[in-house]
Amino acid sequence: AQSVTQPDIHITVSEGASLELRCNYSYGATPYLFWYVQSPGQGLQLLLKYFSGDTLVQGIKGFEAEFKRSQSSFNLRKPSVHWSDAAEYFCAVGSSSGGSNYKLTFGKGTLLTVNP
Amino acid sequence: DTGVSQDPRHKITKRGQNVTFRCDPISEHNRLYWYRQTLGQGPEFLTYFQNEAQLEKSRLLSDRFSAERPKGSFSTLEIQRTEQGDSAMYLCASSSRQDPNYEQYFGPGTRLTVT
C-alpha cells in the first residue's frame, strides 16, 4: 500500500529565508505526486504536481519541487518565504487505475510558521 | 466555474443522531471524491464516484456511512448514529474527464462536531 511521510511536523522560518519541506513516499509504480497547501478555514489548494518528465516542477506562488526516484522523495522548496506562506502543507501520492489518478494518500502535513 | 461547494460548512450534533452533508462538484466534473481529515492528520480517502457509480470505498467507511451521487451530479454523505470519533472535517473533491491526470479540486469542507 502506498504511504507518504512528512518528517517535519512544524517548521519556523524567518520572512525572506529559504524553505525546504521534506516528503518521502512509498509506492510500487511510477507515482503521481502532489503538494497541497491548506490555510485555516480554507480548502486544499494545489501548489504543484509531478506525473512524468522533468523531475523539477514549478508551481504557483513561487514554489518548486524535485522528484528523486532514488531517494523516493519529492521535497518542496521556495527561495524566499513571504509571511502569507504561513499555512499547513501536505504532500500526497496518487494511486492509479487504468492509467489515471483516482485516489490521493496524504502525509500528516507540515505546519509552516513565518517570523517577521 | 464557481468551484466545489459543500453544505453545511459546520455541523454540531449529538451522539447518536444522523447527519447528511452535501457536495456540489465543479460543473461537468465526472469524478467526485470524499475524504476525512481529523485534527493533526492529513486527509484520508473515503470513497469516490465516477458519474453515478461508486467505484471504491475505504475500510474507513463503516456501515454507518453511506454516500450517493444520484444522476452523477451532486453527492451526499450520510452518517448514521454518529459517534464522537466521527468528529472531523469532511472534504469533497472533483475532477474532470477532460484532464487525463484527473487533478482533484477540493471544496472548503464540512466540519462535524459530535458532542
Image (tube, rainbow, N blue to C red):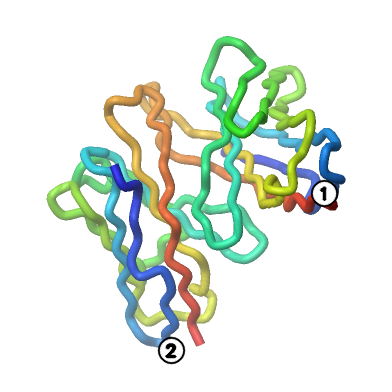
Farthest top residue in view: A53
Work out whether disc 1 and disc 2 sit on a shared chain. no
Front residue of A17/B79: it is A17
Badge 2: how crowded within 10 Å, few (<14), some, or many (20+)? some
Tag on residue B14?
2
Q: Residue furthest front?
A: A116
Q: Is residue A68 left or right of residue A33?
A: right
Give left or right: position of B21 versus A42.
left
Q: Is residue A32 visible?
A: yes
Residue beneath label 1, please?
A11
Instruction: Give the image location of residue A8, x and y in percent.
Output: 80, 47
Q: Amino acid at mark 2?
A: Lys
Which residue: 54% across, 15% down? A52
Residue nearer the viewer, B104 or A14? A14
Measuring from the top left, give residue B46's x and y in whole percent.
43, 54
Q: Chain under label 1?
A: A
Q: Tell me what residue is drawn at x 57 percent, y 39 percent.
A: A1
